[in-house]
Amino acid sequence: MHQRVVCRVIPLVLVAMVAATLMSCATTPVRPVVVLPNDYYLQPDDSKQSEIVKRDGRLVVPAPIAAYAVFGEIVAGALGPVSPSSGQYVDLAFTGNSNTRYFVLDTATGEVESNLDHADWQRRLKALNVPSDFEILPPLPWQQ
């Protein structure tokens, strides 16, 4: 008798465990990301500003990122808040000013250079064989 009850209870317990697992997966919030080369991601921070992280969650380039682009294994862009008009015209290339700071991330080596002025940024891109017509664009607004 005891064996018959156990045989009936075990399948019910297994079904309940599978259902609980599936329900927990369904309620886990998913953060939107843009996949970059070599396990790097562009993602929103808590205030919906873009930042770059490594797959393990380590922050590589902190928010805010005003614009970025990818060439091969190179991710480069401008630091600062996104222009309010960029939400309307995301296909317009970013134009900085004399105060704009830039970054370059070599995803193959993990080397990141940040807080560069425009001239240093251009020299670094040239050293990495990035074409001279390389343009950066504002990230799309995050929807959550």
Image: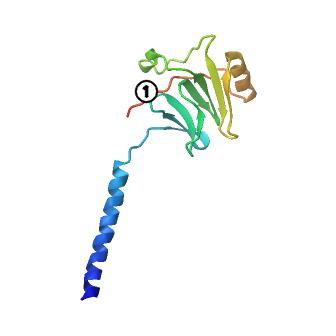
Q: What residue is at 43 percent from the left and 40 percent from the top?
A: 31
| Residue 47: quarter of image | top left
Where residue 30 appears, x then y in whole percent?
A: 41, 43
- Asked if 79 appears above or below 73 in the picture, the reply is above
- Asked if 34 appears above or below 68 in the picture, the reply is below
Q: Which residue is mark 1?
A: 141
| Residue 84: quarter of image | top left
As rendered, which of 10 and 40 lies closer to the eye? 10
Q: Is residue 47 left or right of residue 95?
A: left
- Other residues around mark 1 within 10 Å, as few (<14) / some (14–19) / many (≥20): some
Q: What residue is at 66 percent from the left and 23 percent from the top?
A: 115
| Residue 2: quarter of image | bottom left
- Asked if 39 appears above or below 19 in the picture, the reply is above
Where residue 132 appears, x then y in whole percent?
A: 68, 21
Q: Is residue 4 left or right of residue 86?
A: left
Q: Secondary structure at mark 1?
A: loop
Question: Hey, which residue is sitting farthest top in the picture?
Answer: 98
Which kind of residue does numbered mark 1 sit on? Pro
Q: Quadrant of the C terminus?
A: top left
Where residue 123 appears, x then y in whole percent?
A: 74, 21
- Asked if 22 appears above or below 84 in the picture, the reply is below
